[in-house]
Amino acid sequence: MIVSFHGYNELHIEHILELALEEMRQVIWPLWPDMLESDVVVGHTCIARFRNTPWDLSGPNVQQYVISLSVNELVYLLLS
């Protein structure tokens, strides 16, 4: 699984299995209180677009940075 950030609100997860994607939808996506704009799967790549700017440290959502760090730790635990 390869995770990459695009812009301030888009996350690409490549080579993801269906079971892992369902777990991310249930556990990780709800951590962002503004929710998702879209969650599209193309082949084995999930493109998740979040509302607002979850990882823009100069924007109004800077407090969400702590949640983003927790998400990274959770992804690491899911992959281990």
Image: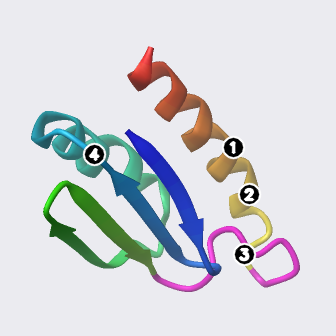
Q: Is residue 64 above or below residue 36?
A: above
Front position among marks 4 and 3: 4
**Residue position marked by numbered label 2 in the rendering:** 65
Q: Is residue 35 above or below residue 59?
A: above
Task: Considering the whole magenta stretch, tell me its main secondary structure.
Answer: loop
Residue drawn 36% across and 74% down? 36
Residue type, mark 2 in image = Tyr
**Residue position marked by numbered label 1 in the rendering:** 69
For disc 4, the neighbor class at 10 Å (few under 14, some 14 to 19, many from 20) is: few
Name the residue at the right extreme: 58
The Cα–Cα distance between marks 3 and 1, rounded to whole angstroms, is 14 Å
Element under disc 2: helix
Quadrant (top left, top right, bottom left, bottom right) of the N terminus: top left
x and y, in percent, of residue 37 in the image: 34, 83
Residue drawn 40% across and 24% down? 78
Q: What segment carries the magenta color?
A: 51-60
Front position among marks 4 and 2: 4
Marker disc for residue 15: 4
Residue 26 vs residue 55: left or right? left
Query: Do residues under tags 1 and 4 come within 8 Å of each other at their CB atoms?
Result: no
x and y, in percent, of residue 20 in the image: 23, 36
Query: Do residues under tags 4 and 2 come within 8 Å of each other at their CB atoms?
Result: no
Residue type, mark 1 in image = Leu
**Residue position marked by numbered label 3 in the rendering:** 61
Residue type, mark 3 in image = Asn
Sequence-wise, which precedes: disc 1 or disc 4? 4
Front position among marks 1 and 4: 4
Sequence-wise, which precedes: disc 4 or disc 2? 4
Residue drawn 17% across and 44% down? 22
